[in-house]
Image (spheres, rainbow, N blue to C red):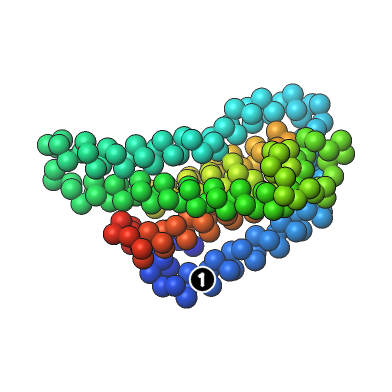
Amino acid sequence: MPVQQFGELISDPRKLTRHIIKVILTSLALAIVAGYFFDQTISAYFANPDIKATIRGPARVLTDAGLSEYYFILALGVWAFAKWVAPHIGALKSHSHRVDFYRRWGLNFFAALLLCGAITHIIKFAVGRQRPHKTPDFDPFVFTPFTTHWHWHSFSSGHSQVIFTAATMMSVAFPRFRWFWIPFAMLVAATRIVVHDHFLSDIIFGGCVGYVGTLLALSVMRNKTKNGLY
């Protein structure tokens, strides 16, 4: 969905619902296919000692770009700056409309992170999929539903959800660079496979939750508050 169409999408409940259903069903289908045909093979590939020696180190560093605390700090920082600091800076007074946009953007980003995170943790708890590094043969079909232990919180990927939430919101704030945000999110999500914290199907649906949850948060902020972006 092109960034410039987000406003039209968010303001039309029927169109938004159809889009969300299509994205969820497509992601589920891809995740199921990945689970049956690719999850185990790809995880085993990255267990190869030569492969691990080459890319596991960089992947372990890059994967932290999916940690939620960075984006909570960013969202609240932008909101606080735009609300309390920017109005007192003379050079920004002529850009009050833009400053107010970033104030609302920070609030919407914060709401999206909260909503997407809640959805992700509910799914993790309900599904209870074992992480790749806990299975000796990378069996993707080991489940212990309704457990709080993180070893059984593989589906769906929280890091993937966070980075796709961030990529969607960054595309809203900086649409000229949307060519960068989504590929970067895909790269960060892929590191979760390399470090054996997730299967391919986990990151597929994690990305879906991040994108869909962000759209829902934007819709709620538009319809239920005075701080909507559209």
Local crowd size for mark 1, using a 10 Å CA cut-off: few (<14), some (14–19), many (≥20): some
Label 1: which residue? 17
Residue at 50% from the left image edge and 52% from the top image edge: 115
Residue at 36% from the left image edge and 63% from the top image edge: 224
On the image, which quarter does residue 7 sit in? bottom left
Q: Which part of the image, by quadrant, shows the C terminus? A: bottom left
Image position of 90 with respect to 57: above or below: below
Q: Tell me where residue 67 appears, x and y as whole percent.
A: 54, 36
Give the residue at the far bottom of this rendering.
Answer: 14
Q: Tell me where residue 145 appears, x and y as whole percent.
A: 75, 50
Question: In the displayed structure, does residue 174 sit left or right of residue 164?
Answer: left
Depth check: 41 or 106 in front? Answer: 106
- Total label count? 1
Secondary structure state at the residue bearing disc 1: helix
Task: Answer whether residue 214 is visible to the viewer in this image.
Answer: yes
Depth check: 176 or 113 in front? Answer: 113
Task: Answer whether residue 186 is visible to the viewer in this image.
Answer: no
Q: Tell me where residue 57 appears, x and y as whole percent.
A: 66, 25
Question: In the displayed structure, does residue 150 sit left or right of residue 96?
Answer: right
Depth check: 64 or 1 in front? Answer: 64
Give the residue at the far right of this rendering.
Answer: 137
Residue at 51% from the left image edge and 71% from the top image edge: 17
Image position of 17 with respect to 220: above or below: below
Q: Tell me where residue 68 appears, x and y as whole percent.
A: 51, 39
Residue type highlighted by circle 1:
Thr
Residue at 68% from the left image edge and 49% from the top image edge: 125
